[in-house]
Image (cartoon, rainbow, N blue to C red):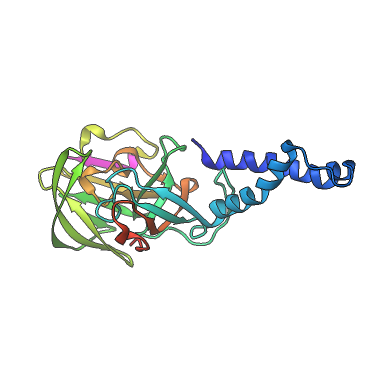
Amino acid sequence: MNFALIMLVLLLVTGVVYLAESLYFRKQRAAGEPQPWWIEYPVSFFPVILVVFVLRSFLVEPFKIPSGSMLPTLLVGDFILVNKFTYGVRLPVANTLLVAVNEPQRGEVMVFRYPENPSLDYIKRVVGIPGDDVIYADKRLTINGREIPVKADGEFNYLEGGLNFVATSRFQEQLGAQAYSVLLQPTVPSVQLSGVQRFPFRDNCAYNESGFRCKVPAQHYFMMGDNRDSSSDSRYWGFVPEQNIVGRAFMIWWNFDDLKRIGRSIN
């Protein structure tokens, strides 16, 4: 469901009625005559819809985390806020960039439209920016020839799908200014080669049994989940075009199962 498109349609319909009431219908009614329902409701809802539309389109938009691909940073059921202004002002629905502000940086958690189906919103971490040479081999990440240091940080266990117990090792990693945790399963390969698809600029990547190497094309980004061995990301479906960017995730505003997570910043 394209909520932004629905909001735009509602805004246009209520806006037309609001304008018609202000310029024409109000003058045609006798003094004290009430508004008919088909005018009263759109006129009442128009200001509310306008405010919500502006806030969601240009400033902040809420999202819910549906999967464990960003564990341990984000849990299933986290409700997060995404800054729509960080990476520039975009035309609602079409998502066309109108005013550039900042470019995504390595290590930031970004929401974007899934390249295979732009009606879906995905959330991953920016690993490679335009021009980067990204290598992920034997569970170690290398950017432009520099291996990213990691530090062991104990274990992290969770239930997947409510039934499958998953045991992982947690490591501390840092890209740019962002320090965060990643999860690794030692027995799982760096890339499930059978899951790699054909995607635009596929020739920029080379895969083997130990991992892959990709050159990020201009105006594209390479994204990976923090739960490295349980994430459908750029390893499998390719690069994220600049026009698919939605915004930067910055805060958890609600979680029904763990109220302590409310207000937590997303690093």
Compare residues 8 and 194 and report the one nearer the observer.
8
Rendered residue at 24%/56% (across/down): 142
Compare residues 249 and 253 and report the one nearer the observer.
253
Residue projecting furthest to the bottom? 177
Does the magenta-highlighted stretch encompass residue 54? no
| Picture quarter with the C terminus | bottom left
Rendered residue at 14%/62% (across/down): 153
The magenta-colored residue range is 203-209
Picture coordinates of residue 183, whole percent (x, y): 19, 52
Q: Quadrant of residue 29?
A: top right
Picture coordinates of residue 87, whole percent (x, y): 49, 58
Compare residues 200 and 24 and report the one nearer the observer.
24
Asked whether the viewer can see residue 79, the reply is yes
Picture coordinates of residue 10, whole percent (x, y): 63, 40
Left or right position of 150 against 6? left
Q: How many marks?
A: 0
Picture coordinates of residue 202, whole percent (x, y): 34, 38
Rendered residue at 41%/35% (across/down): 116
Compare residues 14 and 179 and report the one nearer the observer.
14
Residue projecting furthest to the left? 187
Rendered residue at 32%/65% (across/down): 176
Q: Is residue 64 above or below residue 253?
A: above
Does the magenta-highlighted stretch encompass residue 205? yes
Left or right position of 67 against 84? left
Asked whether the viewer can see residue 218, the reply is no
